[in-house]
Image: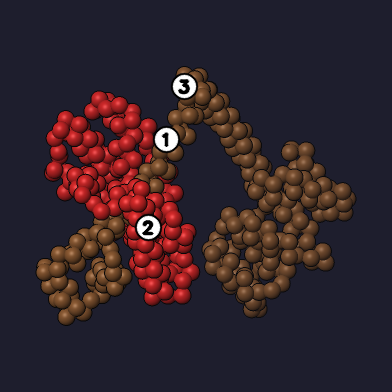
Chain colours: A red, B brown
């Protein structure tokens, strides 16, 4: 079957290529902002933020395999996510939650409510990732963000096989936990 | 905090569905009964979430960079004048393109007409009832206008006659480049050479290669004993 343009874009994203995300964002950002301003009276910053979140969720839906084929256009799909993001934002700002949409879209809203009692803060995790060797950062990104399986990671990073990739990922994860432990110790000493 | 490295390996195996049934039962029992173990597992999961989040934030930063770039572009320029410039440039470009296309189209139609009006269809070799020739079948097909059949049959031969009629057949099939290639195969000592040379010029004209066409026509017209010198001269004048 001949692939259409949207499916080619989805495939590229699925294969770890972020360029289509940047291109789509650049292509539709202004239109979304205008649409959002006229329909929801949002300001430019709010609209841009929602559109960024929509692009991230779109990316996540593709790499996780939730979105494999589109019945609508890419633009319609992304705008639909953006619309829910905007509704959530507006509801949140009026101290209400829009629970229904959280089931429709894989969003980050739930995490925001649950982020309080964690042992490691997001900043600490990001700091620890930044201290890891580049290859470890790549492995973790491919595994957790691009949701690659071990075989794909091995192929992408020229490892011998999936087992090598698995060992590497395990080693990197342990390295990350060590870094986190160090960071917390420093914090306790201070 | 995660203290035991063995637990990390265990958590990884659990998350990757790599535990055996016994190991899985043991794991779940431990989660239910060992608070410290359960706590460590929660921490492990929260680190995984944190990693995902980190890369989401990275992507968001990239998108914000695009915002900065796009916004700085529009801030550096007056949006109204940009709009005007875009409209003017687009209009000018459109007019230019349309004009060029019109000129090109007009001229190509003229050249094509000139070429096809000057082209004389070859009658084909005679097919005699009294004797049989290898060319009978392709020539019959050619004369009957079954050019596809004629082409496939002529391709089986390797001679100047075959190349000449193959080129003529391909011309009828609008396969101009292939026709040109076949005409180029005909050597100077062939009785078809002069005819092939003139036809080459016509095909070049048909393909809008006026420079190539002029060169060949000039060469023909400079040879007074060339069968097509007058035609070549006349065509050059028309061009």
- Label 1 element class: helix
Where A185 sits versus A158, above or below?
above
Whether residue B150 sits left or right of residue B47 in the image: it is: right
Q: Give the alpha-carbon distance from disc 2 to disc 3, as whole Å.
A: 52 Å
| Label 1, label 2: how far apart the Cα atoms are | 36 Å
User: Comparing marks 1 and 3, which lies closer to the viewer?
Assistant: 1
Residue in front for this viewpoint, B3 or B217: B3
Q: Is residue B169 left or right of residue B83?
A: right
| Residue situated in front as seen by the camera: B154 or A163 | A163
Label 2 Cα neighbours within 10 Å, binned few <14 / some 14-19 / many ≥20 = few
Which residue corresponds to mark 2? A182
| Picture quadrant where residue B24 is located | bottom left
In this view, B224 is above or below B146? above
Labels 1 and 2 positioned on one and the same chain: no
**Residue at left offset 11%, top offset 69%:** B33
* CB atoms of marks 1 and 2 within 8 Å: no
Identity of the residue furthest to the front in this view:
A189
| SS label for mark 3 | helix
Residue A149 locus on image (x, y percent) = 35, 67
């Amino acid at each position: 079957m001949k692939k259409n343009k949207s499916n080619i874009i989805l495939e590229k994203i699925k294969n770890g290529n972020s360029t289509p995300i940047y291109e789509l964002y650049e292509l539709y950002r202004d239109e979304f902002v205008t649409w959002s301003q006229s329909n929801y009276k949002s300001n430019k910053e709010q609209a841009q933020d929602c559109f960024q979140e929509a692009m991230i969720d779109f990316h996540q839906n593709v790499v996780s395999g939730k979105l494999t084929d589109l019945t609508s256009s890419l633009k319609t799909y992304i705008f639909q996510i953006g619309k829910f993001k905007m509704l959530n934002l507006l509801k949140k700002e009026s101290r209400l939650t829009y629970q229904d949409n959280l089931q429709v879209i894989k969003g980050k809203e739930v995490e925001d409510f649950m982020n309080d009692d964690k042992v490691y803060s997001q900043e600490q995790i990001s700091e620890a990732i930044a201290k890891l060797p580049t290859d470890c950062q790549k492995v973790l990104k491919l595994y957790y963000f691009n949701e690659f399986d071990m075989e794909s990671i091995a192929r992408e990073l020229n490892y011998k096989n999936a087992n090598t990739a698995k060992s590497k990922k395990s080693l990197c994860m342990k390295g990350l936990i060590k870094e986190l432990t160090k960071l917390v110790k420093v914090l306790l000493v201070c | 905090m995660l203290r035991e490295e063995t637990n990390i390996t265990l958590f990884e195996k659990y998350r990757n569905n790599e535990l055996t049934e016994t190991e899985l039962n043991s794991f779940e029992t431990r989660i239910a009964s060992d608070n410290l173990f359960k706590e460590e597992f929660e921490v492990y999961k929260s680190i995984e979430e944190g990693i995902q989040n980190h890369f989401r934030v990275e992507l968001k930063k990239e998108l914000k960079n695009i915002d900065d770039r796009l916004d700085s572009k529009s801030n550096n320029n007056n949006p109204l004048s940009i709009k005007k410039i875009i409209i003017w440039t687009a209009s000018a470009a459109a007019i230019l393109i349309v004009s060029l296309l019109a000129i090109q189209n007009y001229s190509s139609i003229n050249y094509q007409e000139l070429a096809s009006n000057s082209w004389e269809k070859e009658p084909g070799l005679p097919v005699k009832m009294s004797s049989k020739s290898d060319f009978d079948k392709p020539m019959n097909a050619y004369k009957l206008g079954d050019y596809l059949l004629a082409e496939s049959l002529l391709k089986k031969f390797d001679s100047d006659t075959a190349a000449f009629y193959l080129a003529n057949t391909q011309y009828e099939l609008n396969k101009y480049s292939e026709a040109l290639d076949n005409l180029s195969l005909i050597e100077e000592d062939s009785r078809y050479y002069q005819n092939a040379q003139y036809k080459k010029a016509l095909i070049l004209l048909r393909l809008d290669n006026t420079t190539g066409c002029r060169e060949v026509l000039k060469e023909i017209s400079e040879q007074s004993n060339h069968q097509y010198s007058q035609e070549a001269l006349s065509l050059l004048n028309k061009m």
